[in-house]
Every structure is written in structure tokens, then in C-alpha cells.
Image: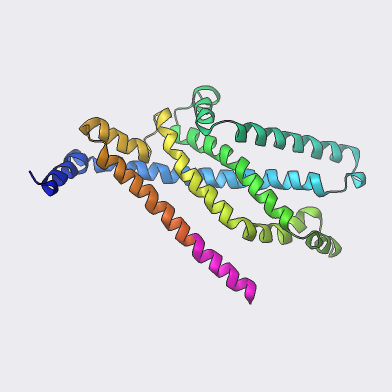
Amino acid sequence: MGALERLKELLILDFVRDQRYMYIVKGLRTTLLVTFLALILGLILGILVAVIRTAHDQVDKKKMGGFPRFLLAFMNTICRVYLTVIRGTPAMVQLLLMYFVFLASSTNKVLVAVLSFGINSGAYVAEIFRSGIMSIDKGQMEAGRSLGLGYAKTMQKIILPQAIKNVLPALVNEMITLLKETSICGYIGLNELTRGGDIIRGITFDALLPLLVVAAIYLIIVMFFTWLMGKLERRLRESDNR
């Protein structure tokens, strides 16, 4: 039997027979859904934590009243604990804790994965945004305040838009990392892309083709986002030069 005939038989066995390719299709759909929702949650958490930590470092606390100063210090402490715990423990352990402990009563595995990866991603996004905010010249904040804008408005209208432009490449890298991290969702029984390939392997006892296809799909998605990031960076450079 020739190599091409053997390959054809394996393709039929792994993907065509009993519509086994649907394990890959459904797994990809779940992977993209979890990645997208977790990314949104991570961005919201990350921006919030970054703003709180930056405000604690930049605001003149001597001009603040007793309770606002205490509240800001308390929130900053909570954020620091959150960053230390999340960045200091493995994502898989966090996922298992979320599934078996914190949301043990939930039957929605997608929700468990989204919350786990969103909280995990938020810690890294927070530091990315914080570095972006700190890279903006202090004169920008002073200019906003001199125009009569409060700290929050200045941050929203002037600082954050510039910070986002600076940290965009790092954010895309975080999104790519998040996409690949979702491959551990199989540990809680969620049929995402990697588990879809592993299910086919378990049925057909052929590991090579299913796992190669899974790897190729991840690679194509990562290459697409890398290409998209390159185009976006060029557009931003062109807009800066105008």
C-alpha cells in the first residue's frame, strides 16, 4: 500500500467516517467563544486594576480626605493581592479550583472557563496597561487637569487612548497566549479544540493526524492575528506621522 493511499485511509478514518471532523469544528467554536469572552472580561478587569494602581501612585494623597485616601489605599491593596495570587499560580490550578471549588454547583463549563481565564488574563492585562499609562508623559495629565478635567476624565479622554496605542502589541500577544491556554479546558471536560482532536485520537487510535490538524488550526489563527497586528501597527505609525 502506497503512502498516499495510507494517508487517504487515515483521513477518512479520522475525519470523514461518522463525521468525526465535527469534533474539531465544535471544539474550535468553543475555543474561540471562551477566548473572546475571557478577553473581554480580562480587558475590563485589567483596565480597572491598572487605573486604580496608577491613581494610587500618581494622585497627591495629601490633598485627599481621610476616607477617599483610605478607600484608594484599600483598593490598591486588593489589586496587589489579586495580581500576586493570579500571576503566581498556574492557570490550570486556577481553572480546577474554579470548577471543583468556587463554581462546583455550576453545570455551565463554558462559564467556568470564561471566568477562570478572564480573571487570569486580567492580571496580565493590568500590568500591560499600567506600563502603558506610566509611559505617558506626566505633562499630559497636567494639561488635562489645567483644562478643568478631573482625574477620571483626563484618564478617559487623554491618557488611556495614548496608552492603548502604546500597549497594543503586548495586548495582542496576551490574546494569543490566552487562545493557546484554553487548550487546558479539557481537564474540566469542556470539548474545546485540543480535546476534540484528542477524542478523535481515542476513537481511531491515530494520534498523528488529529493532533497535527489541531496544531495547524492554532498556528493559522495565531498567524492571522499576527498579520492583523502588523497592519494595525502600520496604520497607527502612518497616523502618527500625519
In the rendered structure, does residue 169 fall within the stretch colored magenta? no
- Quadrant location of the N terminus in the rendered image: top left
**Which residue is rendered at x = 69% and y = 49% of the image?**
130
**Can residue 146 be seen in this snapshot?**
yes
- The quarter in which the C terminus is drawn is bottom right
Location of residue 174 in the rendering, given as x and y in whole percent from the top left corner: 54, 48
Q: Quadrant of residue 19?
A: top left
- Give the image quarter of residue 186: top left
Q: Residue at x 86, y 63 (%)?
A: 146
Give the residue furthest to the left: 1
Q: Is residue 31 above or below residue 93?
A: below
Q: How is the image coloured?
A: rainbow
Relative placement, left or right, of 234 versus 21 is right
Give the magenta range: 229-242
Give the residue at x 22% y 31%.
205
Residue ID at (44%, 45%): 33
x and y percentages locating residue 170 in the rendered image: 58, 52
Tell which of 85 and 72 is nearer to you: 85
Left or right? Give the position of 100 relative to 242. Answer: left
User: How would you classify the magenta stretch by its main secondary structure?
Assistant: helix
Q: Position of residue 14 (x, y in %)?
A: 21, 40
Rendered view: 93 above or below 131: above
Taking depth in this image into account, of 31 and 5 the one nearest to the observer is 5
Please provide percent x and percent y for residue 207. 26, 36
Q: Is residue 25 visible?
A: no
Outermost residue on the front side: it is: 2
